[in-house]
Amino acid sequence: MKIKLDQKIIGYQVLSPSNDAVPPIAPEPEPLVRAIELMTEHVSRPDELYGSTYKIKTPQSEHALYITINDIILNPNTDNEQRRPFEIFINSKNMEQFQWVVALTRVISAVFRKGGDCTFLAEELKAVFDPQGGYFKRGGKFMPSLVAEIGEAIEQHLTKIGMIKVAELGEHQKDILAEKRAKYDSRISSADNNGETDNAFPPSASLCQKCMTKATILMDGCMTCLNCGESKCG
């Protein structure tokens, strides 16, 4: 608001604020918002990483394969704390496959550092078949190749750190499978093997095409998997 003075100024007085005047309220400082750190190729490697090592023993080699996956902790001590894979190492005394193993570890580590959804790696590796044939693991699970077992180890690790959510069977499905298992066991005589067996499922079970485990049996005229619940009858 502008005021035009028509007369000369002959005096002045400084007005002091009265005691009843309300002091101005200072604006509250805005809270500092910490940027959420995401996994990208620009994230530098810290001096210390947390990892897990998985042992793979196959009938294709007398030496075991050791897979180590190291993780990086993003946004530590916050609500946005995340654990993401950063690098992978595969070691073995068997040097026959050294060349492709080194190449595989470098490619997988590069995908880990790229960020985003890296869970597809497990499915891609598990779908690799060896032209010379696969093998059965202890417990009756079929492995189509050594690469597929590396993929399963990666899947196991990503599940442990929460990147892959495993859909578990409901209580109703578990009860049905337990009932079918009890019925089947009551119909057949156990094999005479000093009461011990390597398989957790009946020896006559066939391979399930969904979970690749020898756990499919014929019950009530329907092929049913005792491991994952897959059934041809729905």
Image (tube, grey):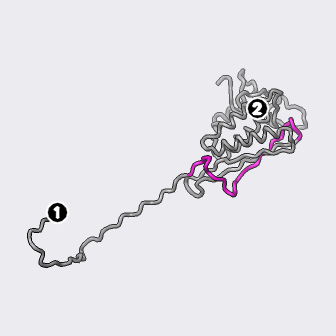
Q: Nearer the viewer, residue 98 or 25?
A: 98
For label 1, the residue is 2
Q: Give the residue at x 62% y 47%.
A: 41
Looking at this view, name the residue that lies furthest to the front: 8
Mark 1: few, some, or many residues within 10 Å (few <14, many ≥20)? Answer: few
Q: Which of 59 and 89 is in front in this view?
A: 89
N-terminal of the pair, mark 1 or mark 2, is: 1
Look at the image and say whether residue 54 sits in the magenta stretch. Answer: yes
Q: Give the residue at x 76% y 26%.
A: 217
Mark 1 element type: loop
Quarter holding the C terminus is: top right
For label 2, the residue is 213
Give how far across and how far down residue 208 sits, in percent.
Answer: 74, 28
Q: Image quarter for residue 182?
A: top right
Q: Nearer the viewer, residue 174 or 147?
A: 147
Q: Mark 1: which amino acid?
A: Lys
Quarter holding the N terminus is: bottom left
Q: Mark 2: which amino acid?
A: Thr
Q: Give the residue at x 18% y 78%.
A: 13
Query: In the displayed structure, does residue 9 sit left or right of residue 192?
Result: left
- Cα distance between the residues tagged 1 and 2: 89 Å
Look at the image and say whether residue 44 sits in the magenta stretch. Answer: yes
Q: How many badges with numbers are in the image?
A: 2
Q: Image quarter for residue 214?
A: top right
Most frequent secondary structure within the magenta stretch: loop
Give how far across and how far down residue 36 sits, in percent.
Answer: 54, 52
Q: Which of 5 and 91 is in front in this view?
A: 5
Residue 96 visible to the viewer: yes
Mark 2: few, some, or many residues within 10 Å (few <14, many ≥20)? Answer: many
Give the mark toward the camera: 1 or 2. Answer: 1
Span shown in magenta: 37-62
Q: Image quarter for residue 129?
A: top right
